[in-house]
Image (tube, rainbow, N blue to C red):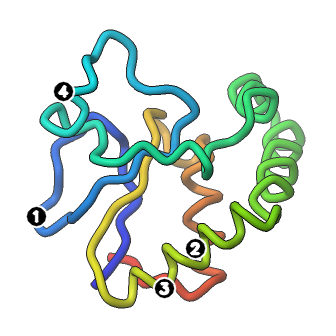
Amino acid sequence: MVVRIVRLGTARNQDEGIRIGTVRRPPRGVPKTGFASGNWYDVWYPNLAPSVDTMKLGQEATTPAQWAAFIRKYRSEMSAPDASRSIDLLAALSQQSNFSVGCYCADEAHCHRSVLRELLAEKGARFE
């Protein structure tokens, strides 16, 4: 059993399981009834998304130093008790269930999901 890190809105992998959207906002122009069938997500879980200010910091990062500042801020947010417990839960679930977490960004290397992958790995999550 594994967790996959995905780009929301892309075709699902075989045996992907539940797709969790770790985004601040739902996809624009998509009715709620189309979230799952459009391969966006089955469950919206903004608790693991960066805050609006942190998200803007990441989107505006053009240098390695700016990106590092985003990572520090996002990691700080994810160390809060509720977020940390959510990461613990997902890491534990990855031992027994297939599921995926994702975001809309085209480039995982410049997206919070790359950091979320690291955080899950640090907690012992199993990956594809």
40 vs 93, left or right, is left
Q: Quick one: label 2, few (<14), some, or many (20+) residues within 10 Å? A: many
Answer whether labels 2 and 3 touch (C-beta < 8 Å).
Answer: no
Amino acid carrying mark 4 in the image: Gly
Q: To which residue does mark 3 refer?
A: 92
- How far separated are the C-alphas under marks 3 and 4? 29 Å
Q: Position of residue 98 (x, y in %)?
A: 27, 74
Q: To which residue does mark 1 refer?
A: 14
Residue at the spot 52% in from the left edge and 26% down from the top edge = 25
Q: To which residue does mark 4 refer?
A: 34
- How far separated are the C-alphas under marks 4 and 2? 28 Å
Looking at the picture, does residue 31 appear above or below residue 15? above
Looking at the rendered image, the disc whose residue lies closer to the viewer, 1 or 3, is: 3
Q: Quick one: label 4, few (<14), some, or many (20+) residues within 10 Å? A: some
127 vs 60, left or right, is left
Classify residue 52 by image quadrant.
top right
111 vs 105, left or right, is right
Residue at the spot 26% in from the left edge and 60% down from the top edge = 18
Q: To which residue does mark 2 refer?
A: 120
- How far separated are the C-alphas under marks 2 and 3? 9 Å
Amino acid carrying mark 2 in the image: Leu
Labels 1 and 2: the sequence-earlier one: 1
Residue at the spot 48% in from the left edge and 34% down from the top edge = 105
Looking at the rendered image, the disc whose residue lies closer to the viewer, 4 or 2, is: 4
Q: Give the secondary structure at mark 1.
A: loop
- How far separated are the C-alphas under marks 1 and 4? 20 Å
Residue sitting nearer the eye, 58 or 29 = 29
Labels 3 and 4: the sequence-earlier one: 4
The C terminus lies in which quarter of the figure?
bottom left
